[in-house]
Image: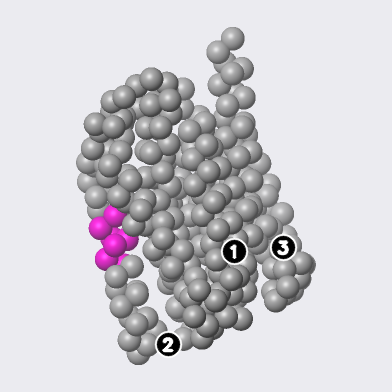
Amino acid sequence: PAAPAAFELWIIGVVLAAFSNMLSSLGLLIQKISADRDKGKACYKRWRFWLGFGINIGSELTITPAALSLAPVSLLAPMTALGIAGSVLIAASGCLPGLKEPIGGRELVPILLIIFGVVLSTAFGPRSENDPSMEAAEVAVRSPALIASLSFVVLFTGVLVGARKTRRLLPDGGTLVCLLSSFDASCLAAMSVVFLKIISTSLRLVGEGDASPFSSVALWVAAGGLATCAPTQLYVLNMALGNGRATLAMPVYLSTIVLLLAVCG
């Protein structure tokens, strides 16, 4: 009797992850419109940015944690690919006022392959039979892999933002800025998901009557990491969208997240 219940849980997690990724892509495209139309405006006047930000952060803080608590990260990672297809199709359709980036038949074939790949990954992807535990989270936050990964992301972000501030090495409107910012945003997003996974696991255990997560170092490290990485990710991604086409920035950003999350998982 336990097998069908577990089966249903991971399906719910996958569906929630797919829905969350589509909402996030919609929010990011609205931010792209803001980056194009609201340049020079005061921050509080960029209503499109705040609308896109609200959709994105609302999805990531509500739907994504629920998905992470029900299915493994490595199984949910391919769901991000749906955001690639969705963002390209939305940008090409012109359904959002102020954003119209047409695509041809050559672009449609990769989109279909992406969707097909997501179906295969979901059907045959890894599924752990063990529930996530705080013991595993404690090991993770102390591992050299996570420490080295976080150090690289922090250093890379600092160098990128510093270079952008000077405007000498990375001038406005360059494709290089778009690519580097998209890659950096995906690194920050992957770290955010790792931290969010620990937090969602902690909250699930607390809901089951286990008070130990509150005394866990992993929970507080994850909370601090998420509070730092998540908003920085949106800042860097806005930089990418403001310096290139959405049909370039979004696929680079989302496809790199798929690879990073699969490794992290």
Q: Is 173 situated above or below 55? A: below
Q: Secondary structure at mark 3?
A: helix
| Residue indicated by mark 1 | 51
Of residues 73 and 109, the one nearer the viewer is: 73
| Residue indicated by mark 3 | 89
Mark 2 or 1: the one toward you:
1
- In percent of width and height, residue 165 lies at 34, 82
Residue at position x 57%, y 80% from top?
38
What amino acid type is highlighted by mark number 1?
Leu
| Residue indicated by mark 2 | 171
Of residues 199 and 190, the one nearer the viewer is: 199
Q: Residue 152: within the magenta?
A: yes
What amino acid type is highlighted by mark number 2?
Pro
Q: Quadrant of the C terminus?
A: top left
Q: Is residue 1 left or right of residue 65?
A: right
Marks 2/1: CA distance? Answer: 28 Å
Marks 3/1: CA distance? Answer: 20 Å
State which region is magenta.
150-156
Say whether marks 3 and 2 touch (CB < 8 Å).
no
Residue 197 in sight from this viewpoint: yes
- Circle 2 residues within 10 Å: few <14, some 14–19, many ≥20: some
Q: Residue 8: within the magenta?
A: no
